[in-house]
Image (tube, rainbow, N blue to C red):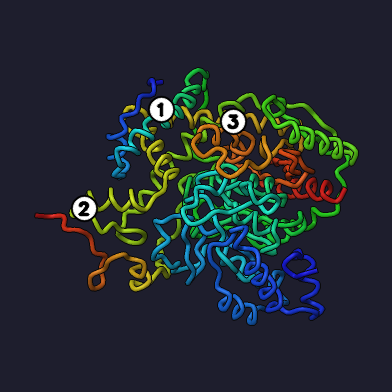
Amino acid sequence: MSLANSTIATLRQRLLTKEISPRDIVTDVAQAIDSQNASIGAYLSWDLDKALKEADLADISQPLGGIPIGIKDNMNVIGEPCTCGSRMLAENYTAPYDAGAIVKLRGAGAVPFGRLNMDEFAMGSSTENSALGVTRNPRDLERIPGGSSGGSAAAVAGNLAIATLGSDTGGSIRQPAALCGCVGLKPTYGRISRYGLVAFASSLDQIGPITKTVEDSAILLNHLCGKDARDSTSLDVAVPDFTLALGQDIKGLRIGLPKEYFISGIHAGVSAAVNEAIKKLEALGAIPVEISLPHTDVGVSTYYIIAPAEASANLARFDGVRYGHRSSAATDLMEHYMMSREEGFGPEVKRRILLGTYVLSSGYYDAYYLKAQRARTLIRQDFEQAFEKVDVIVSPTSPTPAHKLGALKDNPLAAYLEDIFTIPVNLAGLPAISVPCGTAMEDGKSLPVGLQIIGKPLDEMTLLRVADAFEKA
Amino acid sequence: MPSPQIDIHHIAKLSRLALTDEEAVKYQDQLNRILGHIDQLSTYQLDAEPSAHAMPIFDVIRPDIARPGLTQEEALSNAPRRAMDQFQIPKVME
């Protein structure tokens, strides 16, 4: 078995017995990238020499000592590019500092290695919005890997990485993990510092791990969480040892099935796989309980007001002055702003900046933004009430398996509607994980399906416990 | 809720985006369709306090103590244009 195919847990054991070295792992991952990245396109760039130097210095007595972790290209790693999949930052940006999550990873001995493709500024669900290259699903190269963390999921699924970091604003960790057949965890809002994560929608963004197993997800999460003084929304709460959730039974655990989530319109193969998964959970002793999340159908509308509104404000910082693309055609300051942004941003980013600017503009704020914030409260309350009756909630992660590349290219609204199961989780700030649950057939291809498990705020332990029991069954 | 009929040129200016004519037509159409969907919110009774965040965190303050940040050179290192130790922009005053 090659090292690039391995899990963190396996590699750590082999490192501790001195059977392999951190250099061996980085070298093997680099070889996998060299041989397969041309067809999968998960990575935008990687610096082997830097990673080898860091691997040689790694302290393997540390919990992640010597493990290379691939990084979505929207988190700052000192001395490396951070393109966000955009022309805006592709030409001349080098990160002058480490993001909070990267500081944590390094503190545990891990080696950040490689920059992973993504939808531009994390806006999209297919990675097709990247201005810098196409990423393909390793399970079927004609299909999308999902997004926006498509590179992060494709690298793990294609064994071009041991594990990776993604970010999730409306499903951007869970959905690509589901479509590629790996494990993606979005922690509770505030668990992991957002400092140095290029902001898309600040009240929704959260970093999380994409891994081959639930065990690796727990291991990585252990070393990502915690208060960071540089992110005022990061939570000052105790971080448990998440690996204690592994290997537990789930007898008597109440599993909520939202009636609004099991609707027509879900791909038949996805529906069948998720129903099988629920039976499996039942066989493990869990008790299914029908619940209601009555405001489910306003989730997408609420999200596509709040997220673009926050994005339009966050992306105002790209003004061509301090960093990023600067138009050479402009003659005055206004033109400088308008041309630099016009040339630097791609179509989906422009669409969302325009939408966000509109819903915040004079005369429309109350009608859209304020209304969406009220809907957001109701969506959160739906979950609070449901969690009085159940311990976790399960659903499909995505209503469909991976589309073919280009399938939703000219229909942004149709693409937005596919985020229906993942979006409410971000609006409510809850933790959720996507674990592989079989496959769905489409065009004669067997494509991965993900089961989403949603937990109470800060209850990643129960998520991991259910996901681990399910994965091992 | 207002019926969606976006003035794309006004919004593009507020957004500081110099759209091409082609883009203006495309975005006007796409945004009207997206807003048409979003307008379903107006059919709901939304009796709840607005929330800006999911978590009950308010007014986070920190001690007013200087801490290390980027050096001037680091802060300027990504500037597309700089003059001496400053960011350079097109002339603002006549």
| Amino acid type of the residue tagged 2 in the rendering | Leu
Number of numbered markers:
3
- The residue at which mark 1 appears reads as B32
Inter-mark Cα distance, 1 to 2 = 30 Å
At 43% from the left and 45% from the top, the residue drawn is A349
Q: Residues within 10 Å of mark 2 (few under 14, many from 20)?
A: some
Marks 1/3 same chain: no
At 47% from the left and 48% from the top, the residue drawn is A200
Query: Depth-wise, is mark 3 or mark 2 nearer the camera?
Result: 2
Residue A419, horizontal then vertical, whole percent: 59, 37
Sooner in the amino-acid sequence: mark 3 or mark 2: 2
- The residue at which mark 2 appears reads as A333
At 70% from the left and 30% from the top, the residue drawn is A386
In the image, taking residue A311 as reference, residue A164 lies left or right, namely right
Inter-mark Cα distance, 3 to 2 = 43 Å
- The residue at which mark 3 appears reads as A379
| Amino acid type of the residue tagged 1 in the rendering | Asn
Marks 1/2 same chain: no
Which residue appears farthest toward the front when viewing the image?
A444
